[in-house]
Amino acid sequence: MNQVITGLAVSTCLVAQSLLAAIEPASMPLGPVAFTPTINIQTGYDDNILNASNNEIDSIKTIITPNFQIVAEDGLNAYRLQYALSKGIFHSSSDDNYLDHKLSFDAHLEFNARNALDVNASISKNHDDRGTGITETGSIGAGTIAPLEYNIKSIASTYTYGSDSATGRLVLSGKYDDKEYQNFRTITQQRDNTLTTLSAVFYYRIQPKTSMVFEIRNQNVDYTTDTAISLDSSTQRYYVGATWEGTAKTTGTIKLGHVNKDFDSDARSDFSGKSWEADIKWEPRTYSTFNLKTSQSEKESSGTGDLIDSKTARINWTHDWNDQLQTIAGLGYTRDNYRGDTAGRKDNTKDARVQFNYDLRRWLSFGLSYSLQDTDSNIAGIPFDRNIVLLSVTGSL
């Protein structure tokens, strides 16, 4: 548990393109608790900050992300209070500056060898960059003069019955999110929503390191002030699959199944189809890992159509050249089908990224990354290219 909590110290939770390297932050003892601060600073060049097809705006940008956490342990139980801040500064477009916050509390409770409970509660102030979601070209918020700001209150819990070595293990999870936009209310008030997710996963061990997986997941979305767009819906997913660990140098989970999305409004078209989630890691060497992820999901409408049927595939290669130098290279592909859109919109996005991390000290790391995003679409005004180069430094005690 101590290693788990320490690893969480370098997760900012707020920066989409985190460059945190493999530092090992030290804690400061404060009586019965441990205080661990970290900070990540990124600066670099972004050639299309609004994801625009033409008349692009480029800018030098800086993102400052301090993170503080307090951890207490009581035997196998652990408690964590964490605060993270993310300040984004666009030097050529101050209208796009932002300041995000997140305060969260986690508790891990082990009642005995077969019963464990994890609880999380958080409050956050977030933003959507201009040119994304409902502010992209042609969407209901296009033309806004600043990022959309919103608050999220969240509570989640996971109960596990059965030890890791048991033949059968049951995991029950629930999460509730309350999202409320804070600016441009004439546009955003109908996007306020609550999201309730419940799931049950049963693991049945068939080999020492391999288990069958059976999962049921239900998600309800309620747009609390919706009077016109009628996007309230419920989504059910049913999966069967397998998970394995350390078999022929691979570790992974594959789940195949079916999804149904039912809208409360008869004016919306329900969705039904195949669904899958896969996460496979191959480690040909202890210092070199390939990670393949692919999934199908339904994203909420950005103002076009009933929903976005999204299919993704991504492969990353992480290689440690020595104790100090690490490289990460990745390729990704996303196909978004806007179901219910009268124009039949379909977007294809390819992205690539290469990153170098250099650990100068246990408490100090540097990073350099380049990322490219290429989005194509059958709708004019949507396609764009974006290139970002970032230099980062991560420090701790």
Image (cartoon, grey):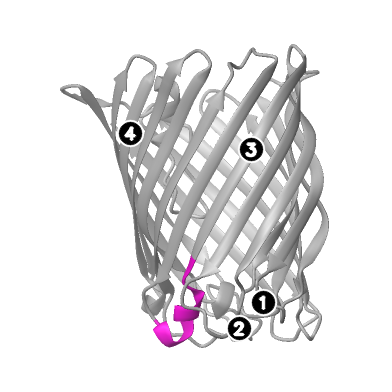
Within 10 Å of disc 2 (Cα), the crowding (few <14, some 14-19, many 20+) is some
Q: Is residue 305 found left or right of 32 in the rendered image?
A: right
> Which residue is label 3 attached to?
200
Left or right of 103, for residue 254: right
Q: Mark 1 points at which residue?
A: 265
Tag 3 or tag 4, which sits nearer the N-term? 4
The answer to if 90 sits in the magenta stretch is: no
Badge count = 4
The residue at which mark 2 appears reads as 139
Among the two numbered marks 3 and 2 on one chain, the one whose residue lies closer to the N terminus: 2
**Element carrying mark 2:** loop
From the top left corner, tell me how far across and down residue 89 is, in percent: 37, 67
Q: What residue type is labelled 3?
A: Ala
CA–CA distance in space, label 3 to label 2: 36 Å
Can you give x and y, in whole percent of width and height, for residue 307 in the image? Answer: 70, 70
- Provide the residue span drawn in magenta: 184-193
The kind of residue on which mark 1 rests is: Ser
Identify the residue at image location x=43%, y=87%. Answer: 186
Picture residue at 43% right of the left edge, 75% below the top: 147
Residue of label 4: 80
Tell me the SS state at disc 3.
strand
